[in-house]
Image: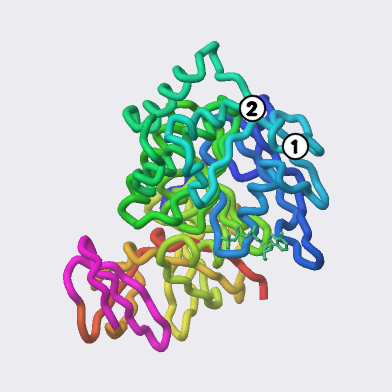
Amino acid sequence: MGSEPEPEGVAADATDDPPAVELDGVTKRYGDTAAVDDVSLRVREGEFFTLVGPSGCGKTTTLRLIAGFEEPTAGTVRFGGESVAGVPPEDRDVGVVFQNYALFPHMTVGENVGYGLNFADPPEGLSRDERVAELLELVDLPDAADRDPESLSGGQQQRVAMARALAPGPDLLLLDEPMSALDARLRERLRMQVRRIQSELGITTVYVTHDQEEALAISDRVAVMRDGTPEQIAPPRTVYREPSSRFVAEFVGDNNVFAGRLVDVEGDGESDDAPRTAGVDVGGETLRVAVGEANDTGVAPDDRLTFCVRPEYLRIGEGESRLAATVESAEFLGETTRVTLDWGGRDLVVRTRDPLSGEVVVGFDPEDAHVIGIDEE
Ligand code: ATP
């Protein structure tokens, strides 16, 4: 799998401009619990940045620290290089959209959007009505101004909530699970609309979701969080193809994670014809995985390697490493069938077009495996 030279969370930015949002060693404790634990990350100007992770990993608390609803126990939040410590939410120039649409039921859609202008003048010298019309146009509800919010679908209500948050022209948009109350189909539609609106405005956006598929689909970069700390911060493709830990490998999409002892290293990695590969003993079978060039992987005999192979890279009857397995179960998903195999007591997941049953041999090539970690014995 190819690697892209991509920046991680606190890597140097391409420009000298300060990041739109920066968390520098930020911790938030509630009693003995560190909801957010020493988090450092940077969100660039105009970026769509997503915090994703299982329930309780600190996503919402991180967002609330950025919004100013919470102050950190330790560390600093900066906007454009300036600390925002002690600056209340209403003075931070942020628009926030929550999970429950929280529209005012006694106001029309137009009044709801206009409500966002009670505390700030419309930008660009527009009148209040002009600004409301402009925003309803932006969220694709140009004729909804006089409607009752409750007459709208959940997805439409969330777009109104977004229009309301955007009305004062904030520098930063914060979205906390805005789609979690919607059904799957609506979520897919709305996420495309949210991304389009964000791109049109070029507004820096921090998005919270527990849905890894949504995170991959919508973001420029993703922070995969666990226990109050980002475990990997990278573009969606990198998080998917080159997970930095077993947790990320298993949280983001289906995966087959293997661990075993290094038995040999072959090839010099100098040319494509001789990729450097390691033989790894997994349950008595030697599986071969690419380990890159000699000077960037310090593999040594008896190291333990953890690596993963995505289901779509496990091919039936092909590949340098072959695994003889038995079909355990299959789920028909339409486009593909997700098949669970038993390989010597371990579960493997493959995706196939054609149904499988009984005994099968699946395989993969060294470069289809991604090494997650090397532990010295
Ligand atoms: P979810 O997806 O379930 O909303 P999350 O990733 O957004 O979860 P947070 O809501 O940030 O997680 O919570 C992180 C941890 O901090 C959890 O253990 C939670 O119980 C705890 N926590 C959050 N807010 C408070 C609070 N006000 N008082 C005490 N504990 C809190």
Quarter of the image where one finds residue 19: top right
What secondary structure is the magenta-colored segment mainly?
strand
| Colouring | rainbow
Quarter of the image where one finds residue 328: bottom left
Residue at 35% x, 73% y is 349
**Residue 374 vertical placement versus 96 (above, below):** below
**Residue 92 vertical placement versus 345 (above, below):** above
Residue at 54% x, 35% y is 165
Name the amino acid type tagged 2. Answer: Phe
Quick one: 275 or 121, which is closer to the camera? Answer: 121
* Residue 266 horizontal/vertical position (percent): 47, 65
Per the image, label 2 sits on a secondary structure element best described as: loop
Quick one: 52 or 230, which is closer to the camera? Answer: 52
Quick one: 356 or 364, which is closer to the camera? Answer: 356
Quadrant for ligand 1 reads bottom right
In the image: residue 313, left or right of residue 44: left
Question: Taking the image as drawn, is residue 270 in sight?
Answer: no
Q: Quadrant of the C terminus?
A: bottom right
Question: Taking the image as drawn, is residue 226 in sight?
Answer: yes
- Cα distance between the residues tagged 2 and 1: 14 Å
**Residue 59 vertical placement versus 46 (above, below):** below
Q: Circle 1 is placed at which residue position?
A: 88
Q: Give the residues drawn in magenta, as a range.
A: 329-355
Question: Is residue 349 rendered magenta in the image?
Answer: yes
* Residue 107 horizontal/vertical position (percent): 47, 37
* Residue 274 horizontal/vertical position (percent): 41, 56
In the image: residue 349, left or right of residue 93: left
Name the amino acid type tagged 1. Answer: Pro
Q: Circle 2 is placed at which residue position?
A: 119
Does label 2 or label 1 sit earlier along the sequence? 1
